[in-house]
Image (cartoon, rainbow, N blue to C red):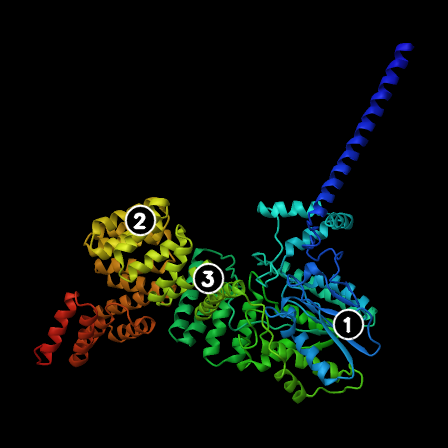
Amino acid sequence: MKGKVSRQKNTGDRSFSFAKTAIYTVFLWIVFLLGVEGLLWIAGAPTLIERQDPSRGFSGLVPVFVQDGQSMRTQPILRGEVFNDQSFAASKPDDGLRIFTVGGSSAFGFPWGANASFSGVLQDVLTQAYPDREIEVVNAAGVSYAMHRLNLVVRELVQYEPDVLIVYSGHNEFVEHDFFESLRERSALSNRFIHAASQLRIFGALDSILVMLGIGRAPVDEDFGMVVDRADQVWDNPAARAAVVDNFRDGLVQLVRIAHEHGTKVLVATVPCNERDWRPQRSVVGEFADDSQRSAWQEAYAAGQSYLATGEFRQAVIEFEDALVLSPRHADTHFLLGHAYEKLGQWELSQQAFERAVDHDATPIRRLSQINSAIREVSTQEGALLVDVDGIFKETSENGLVGFELIEDYVHPSRDGHSLIAWNLWREMAEAQWIDGVEFADRAVFDRIVATRPSVPSNRNAVWHYNQGVILENQDHFPEAIAKYRQAVGIDPDYWGALQNLGLLLRQQGEADEALQIMRRAVALRPEYVDSLLPLGDLLRSNGYLEEALETFQQVAANSSEAAAHLGIGQVYERLGSDDEAATAFEQAIALEPDLARPHILLGHLMIRNGDVQRAETHVMAAVRLEPLNADAQNALGVLHSALDSLDDAAAAFARSAQLRPTHATAYHNLSRVQLLQGDLDQAQLNLDIAIRIDPELSLVHFTQGQIYSFLEMWQEAATQYQLAVERQPEFGPAHQAYQHALAQLGVAE
């Protein structure tokens, strides 16, 4: 018995000892953490919530507005990054008219800010039109905010006794979708714990360390850059897209009902977007029954582009319509079809095609037409006042096609666009008698006030211009992109990214001299950066600085395994007449990247020029096999067939090359030469004219034109063209011979 009691006693002692140790350990950790928190407080370290909202507005625990003396003002962590810096009276005046605007970056006033937005215009107009009233038009729109976050904002705003709530939203429903879904799965308790933890300086310091290590998410600088976080997600499932629209509709219903429950009138606006001038972000072809259908679609799509580029718009429409039969949801086909119809003056069909292009964009960054339909339905169902801004923009735009005139980029209204919205908001509210004692809005008064509004500097910095340039470049708006890059460099002359992109675009647009100067500046900033050295080498080569170009490419080849460096070396050696060294360089490029078509193409051309057609065939066929839709590979195949005297096959290959790249001047020129040999002078002249229209400086065009005139026995015209060919390429012997022959036919001796 004594032994048994002793064991029980020891067990109890151990349990007490363990509990005591655990309590002491927790106590020591608490003391330690409080000590660290105190030291961080003394050092002035910020809490996490002082720098950013960890839930990014999805929890509803961080208010947009906080008390600031006698006013309510935008939360410091939200100013500039997500919301405009706005304020309004903490106690609403008895005779006050308080209007809140909610929405995304379009309502925010991106890229200028609240003053230039329709809210800012409306504030100035209403204040001056009704000087005896206390009017507050508060811009509570948040960048990237979609309907699920707007509902959280509105739950806060109704506490401030608004008279009117303006809802301008619909572009962001596919933005940050995954982040929102993950937060919805998180419990309210978890959200509250994270919010509480964000009040501690320890968590702020930990977050800073994670950001420094590249793990965390840095807050956006207050200089307004591109803060919209758009996941590059593919939405090619119609059911999933419809579900997003349904969620938007349900959220808007909820928002309107919350406002109405608090006695707030609601005005909802449809949202326009740039349909005419903004190409879809991503196009999905879809599934085909077999390879023959895929090939048929590719042929029709490429042919449509070719006809559109060469001005044969009716034929372009036929090809695009055929392509859409095979792939009805391919957004880019709808977009190009819209341009073909526009060129034919068929405005309604053009507008429909552009709208379908937006609706089928597989990475939607613009509202779908179904979103606007939902807005119209909800306004009727819930008794909200509707302003059809989308329809108004179409009525105001030339031929009903909304483009850059009213939209700054893809969705953000221009200054004129914001003024147009503000006028129609005032007009509708006045006619609905939402402003006491007012039954109509005076357009003359509106125009006078807008004309005298002071110009406010925009928030456009170098980063903004650079990002706009990238967007425009991706949309093939090259002159506009060049202008944006120039503006970025004008603000920050050492902005490497802007210099790099500007140099590359200038090179692409044929501005070789300026491009070379720009690329030299970019390389001076990053002397070892391969992506700057390679285009610099290309520019040096094309501008005739062959030795410097060779040194540049060799520098890259010595310090990297870039196949492009060996391609550059090979092309320089070609210009120097060192064909053996050129062939060796191309073979090294193939060894480094066996699946790359370009070195095979260049080596194939080199072999054809040297008369080694058998080796050339090996490389050209390899290029076609690797990249069958490569326009240069098809052009090389045409050159190979020409060398083998297979003129029909050559013509087919050159035609495919031109279809695959409608701006491929060399392919059109080569097709013209084959048709000339086949005796089809009309088609030869047609394709030569296309080649000259695309690239007036193209080599041999004058010689080919002279040959066409020679076949027609138009010797004076032939002599003129041959003379131009000789002047352009004095080393080209056949041009000299043809010129002498034409002069002889004219009975003239040089």
Horizontal side, residue 21 vs residue 462: left or right: right
Quarter of the image with the C terminus is bottom left
Horizontal side, residue 595 vs residue 644: left or right: right
Comes first in the chain, label 1 or label 3? 1
Residue type at numbered disc 3 = Ala
Comes first in the chain, label 3 or label 2? 3
Q: Are marks 1 and 3 in contact (CB under 8 Å)?
A: no
Q: Are marks 2 and 1 in contact (CB under 8 Å)?
A: no
The label number, if any, that marks residue 48 in the structure image: none
Cα–Cα span, label 3 and label 2: 26 Å
Q: Which residue is mark 3?
A: 498
Q: Nearer the viewer, residue 221 or 623?
A: 221
Judged from this view, the residue extending furthest toward the top is: 2
| Residue drawn where x is 42% and y is 55% of the image | 525
Residue 621 percent location from the top left of the image: 30, 52
| Residue drawn where x is 32% and y is 52% of the image | 552
Q: Secondary structure at mark 3?
A: helix
| Residue drawn where x is 43% and y is 58% of the image | 292
Vertical comparison of 4 with 14: above or below: above
Q: Which residue is mark 1?
A: 382
Total numbered labels placed on residues in the image: 3
Q: Which residue is mark 2?
A: 554
Q: Nearer the viewer, residue 603 or 558?
A: 558
Nearest to the eye among marks 1 and 3: give it. Answer: 3
Nearest to the eye among marks 2 and 1: give it. Answer: 2
Residue 497 visible, this orientation:
yes
Residue type at numbered disc 2 = Gln
Graded by Cα atoms within 10 Å as few (under 14), some (14 to 19) or many (20 or more), the crowding at tag 1 reads: some
Comes first in the chain, label 2 or label 1? 1
